Image: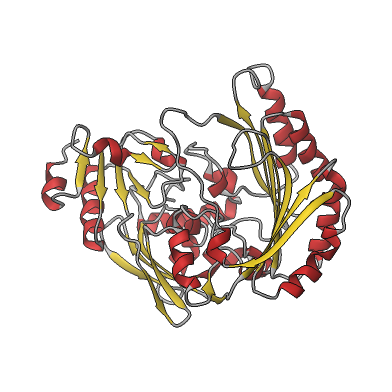
Amino acid sequence: MQIDELVSALPDRVLARGDQGWEAARHFHSGTGDPDAIVRVDSVADVVAAVRWAADQHVPILVRGGGHSAWGTVPGGLTLDLSALDGVDLDGSTVRVGGGATWGHVAEVLSGHSLGLSSGDTASVGVGGLTLGGGIGWMVRAWGLAADQLVGAQLVAASGEVVEVTDAAHPELMWALRGGGGNFGVITRFDFRAHPLPAVVFATLTLAGDSRPLLRTVREVMRDAPRELTVTFMDVPAMDPNAPAGATLTAVWAGDDEDAARAALAPLLRAEGVADAAIETTSYPDILLDMPAADPEVPMPGFVGGNTLLHELSDEAIDRLVSFRESNAASVLLLRSLGGAYGDVAPADSAFPGRDATWFAMAGAFDIPGLVDDESRPRIQAAWDAIEALGSGVYGNFTTSTDPVFASKMYPAGTVARLASVKRAWDPSNVFSRNHNVLPA
């Protein structure tokens, strides 16, 4: 691959193997990459020049924002590091966010204006990857997905054209950006509709004993709960000092009405299995997690399991999920309530699947020698497959799969066909393939 032309077009922006700073540049939050070149862009014009070069050279592009995606580990190609494009600007209730910004930075800026967006749970997660993949966050029941709050975007297409995307100007492309992933170009700016958010009420319930009765209670409470309330159940092993082992139920109320939050939580606070509870009113940035970056010397183990969108948290689903956790010492179980604003969006109005789902579920065993082997791995996978069979659709942001055909598992066939048509219009040569890739129709 000849990069002289790229270096000439973007002096001091391009790094290749052997260059000073290469080693540091190829490390990202979730791992270590081995691309052919890295461009650390500083402007939209830089993005245009890099995209045009990659398209001419038939080089696949990986777009890096927060760096939490597993796609950064796929060798070769051109990595576009957007981290310098991290501006956050307000115009009334519209917030314009640079394509390289992280959600922690956005939350801090908006908090100063008593505003908020439903984002991911982790401060260092990039705005771009999370939004394009949908974005199930703490305010998902109050305001929907991160993608549901998207009202416009600036996109650099495979042709190098800079496109202002809105529902009025490019409705099919706008539809695809709400959950269709990074298939269609480089987003250099996201425009969101922000919401009033003076503070949040955050509750942590420590759980003991069999989780099944508690989860049945949670299910019944959330069926009629105010949409300001979103809850997450987690059961994790003793592996990470930053995540204490055991089961917890955390809850966020979108707003500062602690009395209303306590009233909504009351049935859970007195439920069987709740050993302790802590409730506080705090700022939204303060509840975002601070996940440590990957250590190149200690690679993360594999993960046998997956995630799914459940129409109903049935007794069968609860039993299969809890049994999965009980049967695998080094495993994790996560459930997040959906419904509310998430379900207000008609299936045809965004690319994100499973709008009738009321719960998101994820479970998996860490593939650690001594705990998982060739004999047990098929059993664990079969247990997960039985859980997945109860759901409909996969949340791409919560998978580490880099399988190029994974998109067909994420979306219904009709959605894939519609995405493929949009892909053909904006990226017919599939320059943007380092993602859950949809092939041009």
From the viewer's side, name the closer residue of 416 and 142: 142
Q: What is the x, y in percent for residue 152?
A: 43, 71
Q: Quadrant of the N terminus?
A: top left
Question: In the shown orientation, is residue 77 left or right of residue 221?
Answer: left
Q: What is the x, y in percent for residue 273?
A: 85, 48
Residue found 61% across the figure and 56% down from its top: 353
Question: In the shown orientation, is residue 380 left or right of residue 75?
Answer: right
From the viewer's side, name the closer residue of 183 and 315: 315
* Residue 143 image-quadrant placement: bottom right
Q: What is the x, y in percent for residue 19?
A: 18, 36
Residue found 10% across the figure and 49% down from its top: 8
Residue located farthest toward the bottom when viewing the structure as drawn: 92
Question: Quick check: 291 above or below 97?
Answer: above
* Residue 77 visible, this angle: no
* Residue 365 image-quadrant placement: top right
Residue found 51% across the figure and 46% down from its top: 291
Q: What is the x, y in percent for residue 130?
A: 49, 55
Residue found 44% across the figure and 34% down from its top: 295
